[in-house]
Image: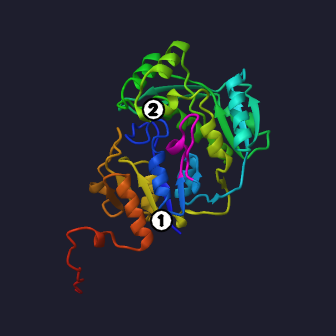
């Protein structure tokens, strides 16, 4: 069995995967050379589109962190009962998105209005990372704890300054997505409390004029999924439909390798501690790059792109030394005793 973890952290401007599900082709490629591809929602969430591979496991970020740290295991399931929570009032497009998922995916789902609104605001920190504030999440946890469900979908607006919204869609992919950072903050806090799969629908709080601009502007292909979407909820419903739960099953000991952009975060520390090699894709740059070679040269495998990363995974699965397929081939090493 070859089990691969693929991460695309949110809010750090990943060149590939930092926009709207634009890491999905890379995920589908990696999935073709492994048995299980463990990924988090940001890798494949594309508003009203989700083309996640059949052999992928959709795992919320904080649950993925704890999994890699050896604190929990992942139990695969046939289906989940999904609870969708929204701020009042429930919009028709939200109901239609849920109904569409019921009719096409066959999901088991219930909707619930929040008594205390979940307020989310997205902005940037001093180094350009997308961050934000989340208010009302503890009240959300208290309210939903009274219900029976396996996975939680949250569909609420995110307030972002209008100039950031228009600038993002006109930046040709050069600007960090201003919504993703606060989504990660909210989903991690709530998932940690509930111990259940959680995902926030990537809904953007936009006025009608900005929305028309988004829908009618020819944008970077990596953002196009957002410009053609209406409700932005379907990707989350599809992901949570069979998202693994916390329970007996796959453990960190079953992970063979992690594939990452050029960054260093909590999953990297966990892989280092567990002795899991990390394939770093050099062309997937971020605003938070890390000098790998200085600190952790022994666990890093460099790949120019995801095509090369997939080749490395395939070689590992075939039991082929990477040095043996590189040129020039070096002389066989001879250990000197004493």
* Position of residue 293 in the picture relative to residue 19 (left or right): left
Check if residue 44 falls in the magenta segment: yes
Q: Is residue 333 above or below residue 266?
A: below
Q: Disc 1 designates what residue?
A: 256
* Position in image of residue 83 (x %, y %): 73, 39
Q: Secondary structure at mark 2?
A: helix
* Position in image of residue 126 (x %, y %): 36, 29
Camera-side residue: 38 or 12?
38
* Position in image of residue 5 (x %, y %): 49, 56
- Which residue is rendered at x = 50% and y = 30% of the image? 179
Do we see residue 266 in this rendering?
no
- Which residue is rendered at x = 65% and y = 40% of the image? 237
- Which residue is rendered at x = 56% and y = 56% of the image? 67
Do we see residue 113 in this rendering?
yes
Lower position in the chain sequence, tag 2 or tag 1: 2
* Image quadrant in which you'd find residue 97: top right
Q: Disc 2 designates what residue?
A: 223
Q: Is residue 193 above or below residue 207?
A: below
What is the span of residues highlighted in magenta in the rendered image? 39-53
């Amino acid at each position: 069995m070859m089990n691969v973890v693929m991460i695309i952290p949110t809010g750090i401007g990943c060149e590939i995967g930092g926009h709207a599900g634009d890491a999905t082709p890379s995920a589908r490629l990696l999935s073709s050379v492994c048995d299980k591809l463990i990924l988090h929602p940001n890798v494949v969430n594309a508003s009203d589109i989700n083309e996640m591979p059949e052999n992928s496991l959709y795992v919320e970020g904080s649950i993925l962190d704890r999994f890699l740290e050896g604190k929990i295991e992942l139990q695969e399931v046939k289906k989940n009962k999904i609870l969708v929570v929204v701020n009042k009032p429930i919009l028709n497009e939200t109901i239609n998105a849920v109904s569409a998922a019921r009719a096409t995916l066959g999901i088991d789902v219930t909707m619930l209005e929040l008594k205390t609104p979940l307020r989310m605001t997205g902005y940037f920190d001093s180094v350009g990372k997308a961050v934000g504030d989340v208010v009302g999440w503890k009240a959300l946890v208290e309210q939903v704890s009274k219900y029976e469900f396996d996975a939680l979908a949250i569909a609420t607006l995110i307030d972002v300054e209008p100039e950031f919204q228009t600038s993002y869609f006109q930046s040709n992919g050069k600007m960090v997505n201003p919504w993703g950072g606060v989504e990660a903050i909210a989903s991690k806090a709530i998932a940690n409390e509930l111990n259940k799969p959680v995902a926030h629908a990537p809904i953007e709080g936009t006025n009608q004029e900005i929305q028309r601009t988004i829908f009618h502007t020819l944008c970077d292909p990596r953002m196009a999924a957002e410009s053609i979407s209406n409700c932005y909820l379907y990707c989350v419903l599809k992901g949570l439909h069979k998202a693994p739960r916390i329970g007996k099953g796959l453990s960190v000991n079953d992970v063979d390798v992690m594939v990452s952009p050029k960054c260093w975060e909590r999953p990297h520390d966990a892989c280092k501690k567990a002795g899991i090699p990390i394939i770093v894709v050099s062309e997937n740059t971020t605003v938070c790059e890390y000098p790998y070679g200085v600190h952790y040269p022994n666990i890093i495998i460099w790949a120019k792109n995801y095509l090369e990363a997939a080749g490395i995974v395939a070689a590992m699965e075939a039991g082929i030394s990477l040095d043996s397929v590189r040129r020039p081939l070096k002389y066989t090493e001879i250990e000197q005793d004493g």
